[in-house]
Image (cartoon, rainbow, N blue to C red):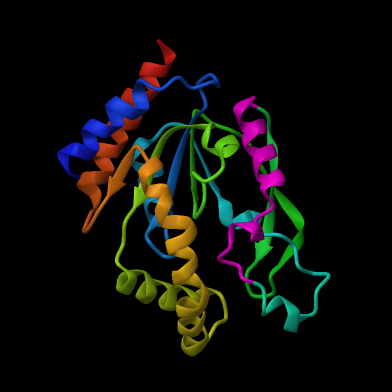
Amino acid sequence: MRKTDSDSVRSRSCDRQVSRPSPPFFVAIVGGSASGKSWLSQKLGRALGGKITRISLDAFYRDRSHLSPSRRARINFDNPASIDWAAFERVLSDCSAGRATQIPCYDFKTHTRFARTEELKPEDIILVDGLWLLRRPSIRGFFGMSIFLECSTRGRLGRRVRRDLRSRGRSGKSVQEQFWKTVEPMHKKFVLPQRRKADVVLRGKWGMREVRELCDSIEVCRGALRV
């Protein structure tokens, strides 16, 4: 992690007036598709120890069960409009108030929601990963700290192909076609501009050393908000 990034955590996050009390302390992990958001969330959760809750914006894609499969296939899922923002904000509000809440279960293969939901109980630190967490002021206001992951186009494409082949029932050709048709244009339009709103920007190669530094920064900022 670059020194300027560490300075940014303290100067821009710790000194910020946060309207909601802590705990819980919300951390936003933002970046392009297949940039490493889930990986970082997992590693931070383990390294922080204690009581951690993890939420992914991916669970809040709108249910498309009322549409035919052919119509679902034409939807641009790389546009923020594909998210059920009202439901997502309700979950964050519940967590902020210390209330248990319900998380939708989304099926990426059919673009529909399962009938079941998963109960989530908020803990002291809530790690939230997603493509567009810093775009809306009403959502951005929940976060005491925000991290943006920069990853090359080539790196994101390679990871996305591997992920979608393994877990989402896609072909390599369809993944690459979608990437160049919608994913990358939407990344430039909606994801990348959030970089300037983030407290920390991780660039290039990063790993466990940066994870440990982020853990230290989270604890410092969390402590500062309790004073």
Is residue 156 part of the magenta span, yes or no?
Answer: no
**Residue placed most toward the observer, 110 or 177:** 177
What segment is highlighted magenta in the picture? Answer: 76-98
Q: Could you tell me which residue is drawn at 43 percent across and 46 percent down?
A: 29
Identify the residue shown where x is 36% and y is 69%: 156
Tell me the chief SS of the magenta region: helix
Q: Position of residue 2 (x, y in %)?
A: 17, 43
Task: Relative to 102, say whether 25 is above or below.
Answer: above
Residue at image location 73% in from the left, 62% down from the top: 113
Quarter occupied by residue 157: bottom left
In the drawing, does residue 150 fall left or right of residue 107?
A: left
Q: Is residue 124 above or below residue 112?
A: above
Residue at the far top in the pictured view: 227
Residue 49: x percent and y percent?
Answer: 38, 35
Task: State left or right for residue 167 relative to residue 209.
Answer: right
User: Can residue 177 be seen in the rendering of this structure?
Assistant: yes
Q: Position of residue 100 (x, y in %)?
A: 68, 34
Horizontally, is 21 left or right of 39 in the view?
Answer: right
Q: Nearer the viewer, residue 146 or 37?
A: 146
Judge from the rendering whether residue 76 lies leftward or rightward of residue 175; answer left or right.
right
Quadrant containing the N terminus in the rendered view: top left
Horizontal and vertical percent position of residue 97: 64, 25
Does the image show residue 166? no
Q: Residue at x 61, y 71 (%)?
A: 76
173 w.r.t. 150: above or below: below
Which corner quadrant holds the C terminus? top left
